[in-house]
């Protein structure tokens, strides 16, 4: 069964700044907090494929997976899918940035996933885990983008 989660956050930064920072995959470890590293594997125009590595968990295990995404800067949307090991059989992510009043952005994540049948938690528990994790990461992303936007304004960059 496919499960569906939607999360959003209001970011106190212009949509252009939010889009630029959120799409700079080199800085994802700093922005999201859940990645130890990101390595670009392939880019062809708006399509990219990269390897994400998580920090070691409490047992010292390190998870790695591939993310393929297609970005549309005109619409400020991304469609991505996760490929690789883990508790999910499939995960697709859509996210979009919408400007609000010139100085704020609504960032929305929409995730559809299927839990692997051999995963020790059920769909409901996985949904709760992903929902909490997404909300936490979006709040961290909000704080870091707002901080970067303030720094850019103070430096005269925007």
Image (tube, helix red, strand yellow):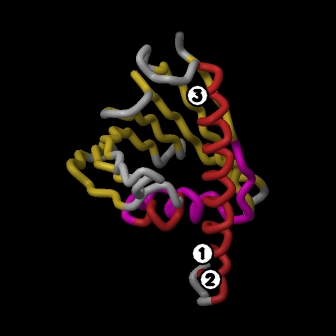
Inter-mark Cα distance, 3 to 1: 32 Å
Marks 3 & 1, CB-CB < 8 Å contact: no
Q: Could you tell me which residue is drawn at 53 percent across and 10 percent down? A: 1
The vertical placement of 94 against 123, above or below, is below
Query: CA gap, disc 2 to disc 1?
Result: 5 Å
Q: Over which residues does the magenta segment extend?
A: 8-26
Residue 129, percent from left and from top: 62, 35
- Left/right of residue 112 with respect to residue 99 in the rendered view: left
Q: Residue furthest right?
A: 101
Label 2, residues with CA under 10 Å away: few <14, some 14-19, many ≥20: few
Cβ–Cβ below 8 Å for labels 2 and 3?
Answer: no
Question: Looking at this view, is 82 or 43 the one in front?
Answer: 82
Do the residues under discs 2 and 1 have CB atoms within 8 angstroms?
yes
- For the C terminus, which image quadrant? bottom right
> Quick one: 145 or 57, which is closer to the camera?
57
Q: Which residue is mark 3?
A: 126
Q: Which mark is residue 151?
A: 2
The residue at 44%/42% (across/down) is 72
Q: Badge 3 local density, few (<14 within 10 Å), some, or many (20+)?
A: some
Residue 27: image x %, image y %? Answer: 43, 66
Residue corresponding to mark 1:
148
Marks 2 and 3, how far apart in space? 37 Å
Q: Nearer the viewer, mark 2 or mark 3?
A: 3
Occupied quadrant, residue 89: top left
Left or right of 74? Residue 99 is right
Q: Position of residue 154 (x, y in %)?
A: 66, 88
- Compare marks 2 and 3 and give the one earlier in the sequence: 3
Circle 3 SS class: helix
């Amino acid at each position: 069964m496919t499960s569906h989660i939607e999360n959003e956050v209001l970011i106190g930064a212009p949509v252009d700044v939010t889009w630029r920072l959120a799409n700079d995959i080199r800085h994802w470890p700093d922005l999201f907090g859940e990645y130890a590293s990101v390595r670009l594997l392939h880019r062809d125009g708006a399509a990219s494929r990269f390897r994400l590595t998580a920090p070691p968990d409490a047992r010292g295990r390190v998870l790695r997976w591939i993310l393929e995404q297609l970005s549309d800067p005109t619409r400020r949307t991304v469609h991505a899918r996760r490929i690789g090991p883990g508790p999910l059989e499939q995960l697709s992510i859509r996210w979009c940035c919408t400007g609000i009043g010139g100085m704020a952005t609504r960032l929305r994540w929409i995730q559809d996933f299927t839990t692997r049948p051999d995963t020790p938690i059920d769909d409901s528990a996985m949904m709760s885990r992903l929902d909490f994790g997404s909300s936490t990461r979006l709040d961290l992303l909000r704080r870091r983008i707002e901080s970067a936007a303030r720094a850019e304004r103070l430096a005269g960059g925007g």
